[in-house]
Amino acid sequence: MTNFEVREYDAAGRLGELDVPRAGVTVSTPTILPVVNPHVQTIDPAALEAEFGAEILITNSYILHGSDQLREPALSEGLHDLLGFSGAIMTDSGSFQLAEYGDIDVTTEEILAFQQEIGSDIGTPVDIPTPPDVERERAERERETTQERLERAAAMDTGEMLVSAPVQGSTYPDLRERAAREAKTTGLDVFPLGAVVPLMNEYRYADLADVVAACKRGLGETGPVHLFGAGHPMMFAMAAALGCDLFDSAAYALYARDDRYLTVRGTELLADLEQFPCQCPVCTEHTPAELRKLDEDTREDLLARHNLHVTYGEIRTVRQAIRAGNLLELVDSRARGHPTMLDGYRTLLDHAEQLERTDRVSKDAFFYASTESAHRPEVVRHHERLDRFDIDAETVLLTEGGSNDRYDETWGVLPPFGPYPRELAETYPLTAEVPDRTDRAAYEAAADGVARLVALHPDTSFTLVHDDWPETALSRVPERVRLQDLHARE
Ligand SMILES: [Zn+2]
């Protein structure tokens, strides 16, 4: 697995480089692969490359294979000339059609050979996209079939073409994890997480977060991970924070066709817009009223361009957030766009321990931006770190205020982290910016930290000086800790 290199982590999010040897290009990730329909090109691939900086796109080899007009030109000219695109081209195999229509007329061997013949840079076997919520037995059976096909694909000589290994398993986390672990053993190159589109269409972001987290547990840091069919910019930050590197979508074009306007907070109807909340060329040069008056084709083209600008803009925002170490602050702010996104974010934080493993130790700042911040990986890590401190003192003061030499040792206390040795006060994440009027979740997390420390040192006597903590937090502090209110004491 030498084609993918991670440059930087934030939570499980990663800045990476995917080397695509057949195309002779290196693709920066996270990124989006615009879906190009070989028959109907809303925005032509040359424009994707020149105007939007697309380094990679995805098209469907099954459509080409079955097309009387396009099959021969694809074989004779090759995919890059046919589409007019010099970057990396990934091809899908017809699995989508299989899911839609229940039957396709190619095998994995035939379609992979065809993908190689037409010059695809990343090919895809025919996996079985098992939908969410099916019976477990079906999910198991189809996962096995997919795995057999991946193994057959891995056994083929596909030259320099990379080959993807889709991970299925429906909505069963253990099956997803197992599918991922077995997909990894094939030595194939790219790992699409399949059949998640129904979850996204139904705004089931919590289930999506569980599925992605399960797949990632199976894959480990093997990559890159492709969230198949994910193209709405509102969920890029969340998916990236869980460890997805590639997204693909026809949303920019499909939505434009229906006069739908993408934003990072959700989707708007052109009919409802009085102003464009966007700075892209389309939105600065037109008003919604002007766009509504245009003929359908022009309007569709302009809306598709806006949708792409927002999509690539969000990809850049996600990359910069990973670079800056504030991806989770970005996820937090995106999660406010829709209550189901908030469910997704909260579910992501259920996996904080998993995300903590790759999260980097030091960043610029931790912003306590919401009650969810109390459950971030940094808090989990701080609590785990408490296990490693020796305390060689009979009496220890844990305090949000100043030290007091009546005690052998004084530790600081900072919600949501809890107690910390004072010499660490200037280190990440204890340099956190926390609002003065913080919330119960922060105090409760701090109290959990106190409880953990106290349990580790049964022979030490602890006093906690807190700044008006609520009862729900104080009740989490072990009884043997003496409590004082910071202001009552003055
Ligand atoms: Zn715009």
Image: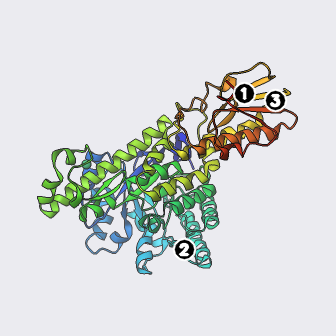
User: Badge 1 is on which residue?
Assistant: 411
Residue behind label 3 places its C-beta within 8 angstroms of ligand 1: no
Discs 3, 1 touching: Cβ within 8 Å: no
In the picture of the structure, the residue carrying the numbered disc 3 is 391
Residue type, mark 1 in image: Trp
- Kindly report which numbered mark, 2 or 1, lies closer to the viewer in this rendering: 1
- Whether residue 358 can be seen here: no
Q: What element carries label 3?
A: loop
Q: Characterize the local packing of mark 1: few (<14), some (14-19) or many (20 or more) Cα atoms within 10 angstroms.
A: many
Q: How crowded is mark 2: few (under 14 residues within 10 Å), some or many (20 or more)?
A: few
Q: Quadrant of the C terminus?
A: top right
Position of 465 relative to 272 (above/below): above
Compared to residue 376, the image places residue 99 above or below, namely below
Q: Mark 2 points at which residue?
A: 133
Q: In this view, does 271 lie above or below 95?
A: above
Q: Is residue 414 visible?
A: yes
Q: How far apart are marks 2 and 3 (CA)?
A: 51 Å
Tell me the SS state at disc 1. strand
Q: Earlier in the sequence, mark 2 or mark 1?
A: 2
- Left or right, 110 with reference to 37: right
